Image (cartoon, helix red, strand yellow):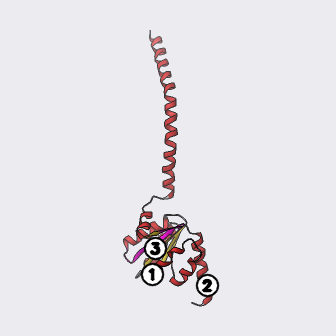
Amino acid sequence: MNRTEKTELVESLQQVFQTARLVVVTQNSGLTVAEMSFLRREMRAAGGSFKVTKNRLARLALKGTRFEPLADHFRGPTAIACSDDPVAAAKVAVDYAQKNNKLVVLGGAMEATVLDAPGVKALATLPPLEEVRAKLLGLLMAPASKLASVIQAPGAGLARVVNAHAEKGEAA
């Protein structure tokens, strides 16, 4: 790899670090090409990316980004999983690491929050963003619908009483 290729790689990694909301650093010793391809496909399907990195170049690319504290994780055969969704890359990486012990999650960062390996695993257990939004919307709508039914109840009760008296009067 010549100097211009290294410069281009550092610039592309900096672009990834500037746009991603989540970065997960993994150690991938012994993964075959087929296993790596499968992991990349899974990551793409979830809206993320998985890229093997050169440690020295990755540490250079991290300088000046919000993920700079991750520089200590880049030792040995490492790769990064990135996504714009704050949970997607963590879910795929942790799920794959549980199935294949050749992939080890070292840590990560979400926005400016640095996570250790258990933190990334905890993040992976969170439900997807759309599910959280749906639950929140349901919680917000519940009091309004209950209030509407409580306000409506006296009027409906009065209408039933008047209707019962009217039917009683017709029967007599």
Where is residue 153 drawn, in percent x and y? 49, 28
- Specify the segment rendered in magenta: 100-114
Could you say whether the residue bearing mark 2 is in a helix, strand or loop? helix
- Amino acid type, mark 1: Val
Structural distance between the alpha carbons of marks 3 and 1 = 10 Å
Main secondary structure found in the magenta portion = strand
Structural distance between the alpha carbons of marks 3 and 2 = 27 Å
Determine which of the numbered discs, if any, sits on residue 33 in the image: 1
- Amino acid type, mark 2: Thr
Decide whether residue 105 is among the magenta residues. Answer: yes
Please name the residue that numbered disc 3 is placed on: 39
Nearer the N terminus, badge 3 or badge 1?
1
Where is residue 58 drawn, in percent x and y? 54, 80
Q: Nearer the viewer, mark 3 or mark 2?
A: 2
Residue at the top extreme of this rendering: 172
Q: Are marks 3 and 2 in contact (CB under 8 Å)?
A: no
Could you say whether the residue bearing mark 3 is in a helix, strand or loop? helix
Please name the residue that numbered disc 2 is placed on: 7
- For label 1, the crowd category at 10 Å Cα-Cα, with few meaning under 14, some 14 to 19 and many 20 or more, is few
- For label 2, the crowd category at 10 Å Cα-Cα, with few meaning under 14, some 14 to 19 and many 20 or more, is some
Nearest the viewer among 97 and 111 is: 111
Decide whether residue 42 is among the magenta residues. Answer: no
Nearest the viewer among 114 and 143 is: 114
